[in-house]
Amino acid sequence: MKTVTIEELLTWAFVHELPKGGGVDGLDNPNSAWRTLQASSWGKILSFGELGALIDRGAGDYDNYWIEQGEPHDDAVLVGRAVAGLAQCDVVVPEGWNALADWPDTEGLAQAAVDRAIERYRARPRHLRAEGVVSLVVGTAILGREPDYQAEPSKLRMVERGGRPAWFVLQRIRHEDGKTYDIEVDGYNARSGRPMSGAYRKHELSADPAGDILGRLDYQIWVAALRRLEQEILAQLAGHRLVFSERSMTPWLDSDRPGVSMIEGAAERAAKKTGSAR
């Protein structure tokens, strides 16, 4: 019995065992062990998500791809079924989640960027979030590496317009509903060439950290998925002994802190797509 980590087991399963039945096309072939498991678990997706395309092909397209590969190992089938089952889960991002807690003080701008990124992630249809989890786990297994969580801190700089200082002022307006609102408008008086009374300046980040934030979100989703898979398959493996991973949820911090989690829940089925690409 071979002792492995969950990452090693996933790589073995998706690189060596689950492509069987797919000939030279491997995982991407609908006849591969992996595609068969997907079809029985949550609907037939005909193209591996990491390739960036979803293409519906006829069976005849694969007539010349058959080579004898044998049956996949039982442990690989177990792993594949558990990974396909991740599509029935959803990601929970805790309130106040701070992906940039290691950054210097940014006067709240970093946290505001995190909040915007998470709002966009939560707005994705649930079935797309579920597909993303499965693709993330399979893709990292094939590549043999973890998601990139590096996030170089952005610098604070004063907001400018056309290379000149930008000024802002709050203006109170009355809406047609009868309520009054304060809105931020241009606080520079071009006629006098001076800032308006009460005008102020603002800081902004030197670079948009949205990509880095989503990268750290992907990393935590990956770790949460690995932990779930460990618990699910530990007692069922026949030819492997699993040792639990000690991966931190927050390797960019000095200590492991709580992060995102995964909960069981029937994901929405993806709408049928024919001859489409994304």
Image: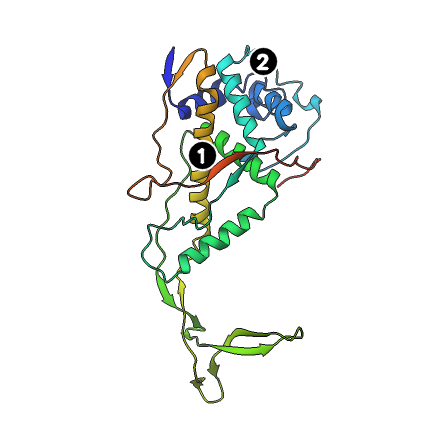
Residue found 37% across the figure and 24% down from its top: 244
> In this rendering, is residue 54 above or below 110?
above
Q: Nearer the viewer, residue 274 or 246?
A: 246
Mark 2 highlights which residue?
67
- Residue 66 on image: x %, y %: 61, 15
Could you tell me the amino acid type at mark 2? Ile
Sort mark 1 into few (<14), some (14-19) or many (20+) by Cα contacts within 10 Å. some
Could you tell me the amino acid type at mark 1? Ala
Mark 2: secondary structure: loop
Residue 221 as seen in the image, left or right of residue 274: left
Mark 1 highlights which residue?
224
* Residue 208 circle label: none
Mark 1: secondary structure: helix
- Residue sticking out furthest to the bottom: 192
Residue found 31% across the figure and 56% down from its top: 104
- Residue 200 on image: x %, y %: 41, 76
Residue 73 visible at all: no
Residue 266 visible at all: yes
Q: Which quadrant of the rendered structure holds the C terminus?
A: top right
- Residue 230 on image: x %, y %: 44, 24
